[in-house]
Image (cartoon, rainbow, N blue to C red):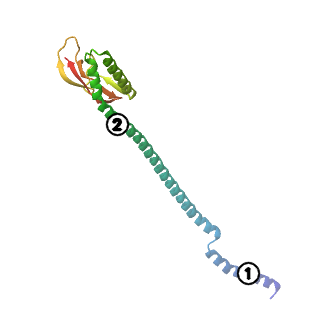
Amino acid sequence: MSKKDKEKKAPEAESENVTPETEPAEEKVRPEEASADETPTQESTGETELEAARKAQAAEHDQYLRLAAEYDNFRKRSRKEKEALYTDVKAETVAKFLPVYDNLERALANETADEAYKKGVELIMTEFRKIMTGLGVEEFGTAGDAFDPNAHNAVMHVENEELGENVIAQVFQKGFRIGEKVIRHAVVQVAN
């Protein structure tokens, strides 16, 4: 064989040798193709994990906001209940002293010859009214006021042309209230 023939055969042998080596290489998955196939799966998995984490964070944030709102409502409700309880207790206490007020008022209405006695009762009544005012207690129910069934207790009815309709003609017992809460209804006579 000549050199030329050997050279011709060498490339043929090389091509024969190359072919078996390239075929198994084609059967193997190329690293570029493998990473291209796996990348969308990893990205989609990463995106779903991110979405799940965002949803969990949103749920936790929502739960936190609800809890904060519940606490705020509880705090407001507790404050209102405390204020209402304070007003109720104060009203009950004042109601127990109202018979004393009524007796002092009757004592002032009676004529007496003893000026010192009358002056002493007036001083006691003045001090009692000052204390009641300090507690936020208001008197109501005077002759000439409009009749209010929520605040007045009508025990009598009289026909009087001088007074308008549903006007208080006479007060038998004064009423008391703290703010909007009525402690005792005024006992009155209503005209027309």
Residue 82 location, quadrant:
top left
Left or right: residue 8 versus residue 174 is: right
**Residue 49 vertical position relative to residue 184 in the rendered view, above or below:** below
Q: What residue lies at 58% left-to-right and 66% top-to-bottom?
A: 38
Element type where label 1 sits in the image: helix
Quarter of the image for residue 170 reads top left
**Which badge, 2 or 1, comes first in the chain's sequence?**
1
Give how far across and how far down residue 118 sits, in percent: 31, 18
Q: Looking at numbered disc 2 in the image, what kind of residue is underneath it?
A: Val
Dividing the picture into quarters, in which one does residue 47 lie? bottom right
**Location of mark 2 (residue):** 89
Q: Which mark is residue 53?
A: none
Residue 34 or residue 149, whichever sits in front? 149
Q: Which mark is residue 14?
A: 1
**109 sits left or right of 134 in the view:** left
Residue 94 image position (x, y, % from top left): 32, 31
Amino acid, disc 1: Glu
Examine the rendered structure and indicate whether residue 17 appears above or below residue 153.
below
Query: Residue 24's x, y, as percent?
Result: 64, 78
Depth check: give the residue in front, 121 or 184: 121
Mark 2, Cα crowd under 10 Å, few <14 / some 14-19 / many 20+, is few
Please state if 110 lies on the left or on the right of 29 as rendered: left
Would residue 11 be visible to someone looking at this image? Answer: yes
Q: Residue visible at 17% across and 15% down?
A: 159
Q: List x then y, in percent, for residue 13.
A: 73, 83
44 vs 144, nearest the viewer: 144
